[in-house]
Amino acid sequence: MFDQINIETLILKYLQGELTEGEQRELDEWLKDDRNKKLFSRLINKQRILVKMERLDEYDWEKSWNVVERKLHGRRKFFWKYWGIAASLLGIVLLGTWMFMERNEENSPMVVIRGVEPGRVFAELVLPGGKIVELSKDSNNLFLGEGGNILRNENGVLFLTQDSVRLQKVDYNEIRTPRGGEYQVVLPDNSIVWLNAESKLRFPSTFSGKERKVFASGELYFQVAKDSLSPFRVEIEGLYEVEVLGTEFNVRAYSNLPSATTLVNGRVLIRDKGAKVVLKAGEQAVKGKNGEGMVVRAVDVAPYIAWKQGYFLFENERLEDILNELARWYNVNVFFENSSVREKRFSVDMPRHESFKEVLHLIEQTRSIRIEIEGNNVFVK
């Protein structure tokens, strides 16, 4: 019977190149189990480690170090070399969770879901006259909009520019992503908008007058170009309006969920039924799904903008909330047959383009949960 903490320590030392001959023999003995060998192969994958290294600045190192100290119970501390940092980060975030799940996989009633693919770069553009154009990462084209503006689709990004000579009137275009889709838009003022799955952005062919106004629903990340003479306004699903001059923020406004505006930097003004709320960087305004009053709170913005950076980051979140988010990206339907598991809390941190199977493997405490799939329907029991 191997001690889990000791095995984690051996793997960390392996990555640092600090194993003694005796420790190597102990690790080799543990690797005789095929399940352990598969897990070990995943944990030492250099690409996975580098993905973690790219996001080091977003981690709470004091909190992470406290976790390490609790797990090692006074064992000697390692030197934090380059690979040592990566290995320790993996130890904090992945080793305990993955090893726990691997050891319990044989007794776990979870049924592995296969064949469910992650989302992709795809959207539909609805022109003012109603014509629908499919957009994808592989479709590069240039065409003239009905109002005289020029639209260019290139490598998964839609660029919108105005032809100052031919532009006759201001019409509205709409870009919409389905479940399992995402896209990026560069507006005429060079503001950039990222659309998550199942989202919409309605925008004019050009910005004229004293304001730049768009309409949004779903989840979108805005990087607004500065223009002190023309504020940028986003009307959220008919609920409230966000006004900025130049900043970055995330909007989440799905019809079945509370809406949230999370400010990454700068300042924004939110107008809600006559009331005004000013957000500072690191703050979030949340409005109930039935339109009830708005609450402002300080947050760690990382989990709320992780999707835009290409990964999932759930920290002690309800299983129902996690699976509903995954369902939108992987285009599956989730049904809870055992309502008691909805409130169980899990942590997940991984790239969004992993298979659904990989995501499920990162959910902790699976022994009490059973998951089955029929087509694109996922049943949680």
Image (spheres, rainbow, N blue to C red):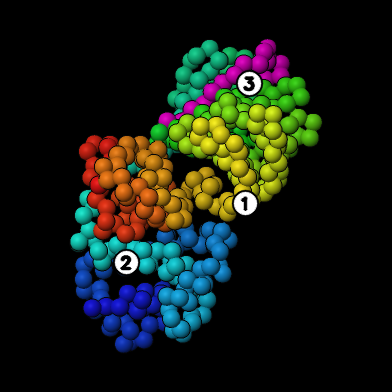
- Check disc 2 and report the residue beneath it: 99
Q: Is residue 362 visible?
A: yes
What secondary structure do most residues of the magenta stretch adopt?
Answer: loop
Q: Say if 146 sits above or below 375 in the image.
A: above
**In the rendered image, the vertical position of residue 332 relative to residue 367, given as above or below:** above
In the image, which residues are magenta? 162-178
In which quadrant of the rendered view does residue 94 lie?
bottom left
Label 3 to label 2: alpha-carbon separation = 53 Å
Q: Is residue 173 magenta?
A: yes
Q: Residues within 10 Å of mark 3 (few under 14, many from 20)?
A: many
Provide the residue designation for mark 1.
Answer: 298
Name the element at disc 2. Answer: helix
Instruction: Give the residue pinned by disc 3.
Output: 205
Q: Earlier in the sequence, mark 3 or mark 1?
A: 3
The answer to whether mark 3 and mark 1 are in CB contact below 8 A is no
Q: Disc 3 marks which amino acid? A: Ser
Residue 174 is a magenta residue: yes
Q: Which tag is nearer the camera, tag 3 or tag 1?
A: 1
Drawn side of residue 229 relative to residue 39, left or right: right
Query: Residue at horizontal 33%, vertical 42%?
Result: 117
Furthest residue to the right? 229
> Can you tell which mark lies on residue 366?
none
The residue at 31%/66% (across/down) is 100
The answer for how far apart the CA atoms under marks 1 and 2 are is 34 Å
Mark 1 vs mark 2, foreground winner is 1
- How many discs mark residues in the rendered view? 3
Task: Tell me what residue is drawn at x 55 percent, y 32 percent.
Answer: 291
| Residue 104 picture location, percent across and down | 25, 64
Give how far apart the Cα atoms at labels 3 and 1 are: 36 Å
- Image spot of residue 292 (x, y percent): 56, 34
Amino acid type at mark 1? Ala
The mark that comes first in sequence, 1 or 2, is 2
